[in-house]
Image (cartoon, rainbow, N blue to C red):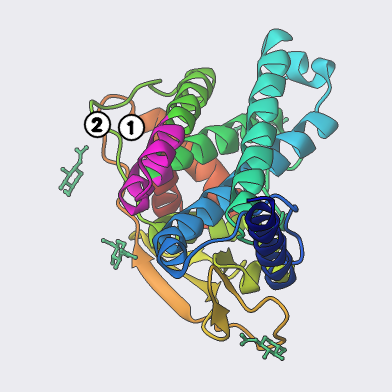
């Protein structure tokens, strides 16, 4: 009796050790997985790392913005001081999303993607910062909506829905602040991973190498969009040394980063087209992205 308990404990320890050696950044609580469990987890880990990619971007965006803009800057830009407080709450939500997703991925023996270096292009203009914030939050909503079908673990689907709705609340508030309709249509527009990375990649300057090796994606800064909503970009995906839940994180094999191109649907929701295209033009020109293509962010 005691012997078999010790044996089970020993096997669990061994499995944990193997798991950790596969994924050096793991916490010790990564429970061993059967091959069948690993197969089931693969798509879920990919979508978790995809969500984490976006949450890192948002968290860094608010953290940097709050460091830069004082309450006086906010008031000088014509907003009440409370706006900065509310932005601070959004920043806290995004930081918690990052830490929670990271812990969940580690608990599944996955390797979480890390924060990249970003250029959000708002300069020292708080109004532009809010416009980019609104664009990011609306994209986040579309990303979670589009990714839901990739999740095969039911409890994770509920967890993802609870994040998606919070992103929707942020989006509504920010839309309102920048003079856009807070709830533009009866159905939000789902975007798939390719489309979201095409939108997000212009903000990404560079990413740590581990991102290429994770069972995830690392978009790079080659994102260029033409005026008709066609965006090209590169995304690195692991194509070598895939072992279990992750790419072989000890392998120095260069990941493949193929150039891709996709069409992002234009913003054609009615009612506030002028303010939306106005915001898109300002932000788009700052980023050197076609205004019409950038309007796709305001879905
Ligand atoms: C900030 O950007 C907004 C539009 O994004 C523009 O209307 C305004 O003039 C800019 N403010 C400054 C001080 O440049
Ligand atoms: C995403 O949608 C675009 C546009 O409809 C399509 O071309 C692309 O193949 C889709 N990508 C994935 C991964 O489904
Ligand atoms: C992982 O990569 C290392 C270094 O390239 C290599 O020695 C090892 O055999 C690889 N493991 C697997 C399972 O591919
Ligand atoms: C946007 O335009 C496309 C193509 O013209 C159309 O299929 C789609 O239904 C429109 N979406 C909305 C929300 O009006």
Tag nearer the camera, 1 or 2: 2
Q: Label 1: few (<14), some or many (≥20) within 10 Å?
A: some
For residue 6: magenta? no
The residue tagged with tag 2: helix, strand or loop? loop
Q: CA distance from mark 1 to mark 2?
A: 17 Å
For residue 157: magenta? yes
Point out the quarter of the image occupied by ligand 4.
Answer: top left
The kind of secondary structure the magenta stretch mainly shows is helix
Which stretch did the figure color magenta?
143-161
Residue shown at 47%/65% (left/top)?
38
Residue shown at 67%/61% (left/top)?
7
Viewer-closest of 201 and 275: 201
Q: Quadrant of residue 11?
A: bottom right
Viewer-closest of 79 and 18: 18
- The image shows residue 72 at horizontal and vertical percentages of 83, 16
Q: Could you tell me if residue 232 is visible in this image?
A: yes
> From the viewer's perspective, is residue 288 above or below residue 123?
below
Q: Which residue is mark 2?
A: 187
Q: Quadrant of residue 91?
A: top right
- The image shows residue 141 at horizontal and vertical percentages of 42, 37
Q: Which residue is mark 1?
A: 273
């Amino acid at each position: 009796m005691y012997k078999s308990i010790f044996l089970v404990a020993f096997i669990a320890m061994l499995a944990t050790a193997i798991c950790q050696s596969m994924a050096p950044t793991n916490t010790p609580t990564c429970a061993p997985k059967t091959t069948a469990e690993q197969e089931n987890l693969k798509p879920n880990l990919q979508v978790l790392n995809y969500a984490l990619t976006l949450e890192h971007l948002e968290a860094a965006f608010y953290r940097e913005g709050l460091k830069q803009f004082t309450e006086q800057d906010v008031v000088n830009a014509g907003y009440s001081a409370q706006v900065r407080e509310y932005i601070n709450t959004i920043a806290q939500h995004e930081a918690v999303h990052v830490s929670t997703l990271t812990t969940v991925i580690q608990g599944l023996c996955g390797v979480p993607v890390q924060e990249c270096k970003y250029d959000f292009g708002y300069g020292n203009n708080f109004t532009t910062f809010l416009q980019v914030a609104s664009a990011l939050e609306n994209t986040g909503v579309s990303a979670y909506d589009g990714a839901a079908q990739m999740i095969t673990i039911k409890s994770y689907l509920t967890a993802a829905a609870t994040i998606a709705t919070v992103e929707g609340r942020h989006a509504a508030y920010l839309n309102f602040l920048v003079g856009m309709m807070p709830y533009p249509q009866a159905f939000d527009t789902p975007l798939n991973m390719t489309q979201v990375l095409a939108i997000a990649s212009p903000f990404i300057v560079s990413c740590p190498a581990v991102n290429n090796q994770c069972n995830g994606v690392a978009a790079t800064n080659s994102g260029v969009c033409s005026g008709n909503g066609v965006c090209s970009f590169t995304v690195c995906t692991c194509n070598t040394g895939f072992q279990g839940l992750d790419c072989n994180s000890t392998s120095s094999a260069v990941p493949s980063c193929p150039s891709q191109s996709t069409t992002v649907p234009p913003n054609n929701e009615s009612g506030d087209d002028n303010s939306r295209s106005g915001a898109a033009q300002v932000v788009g020109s700052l980023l050197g992205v076609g205004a019409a293509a950038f309007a796709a962010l305001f879905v």
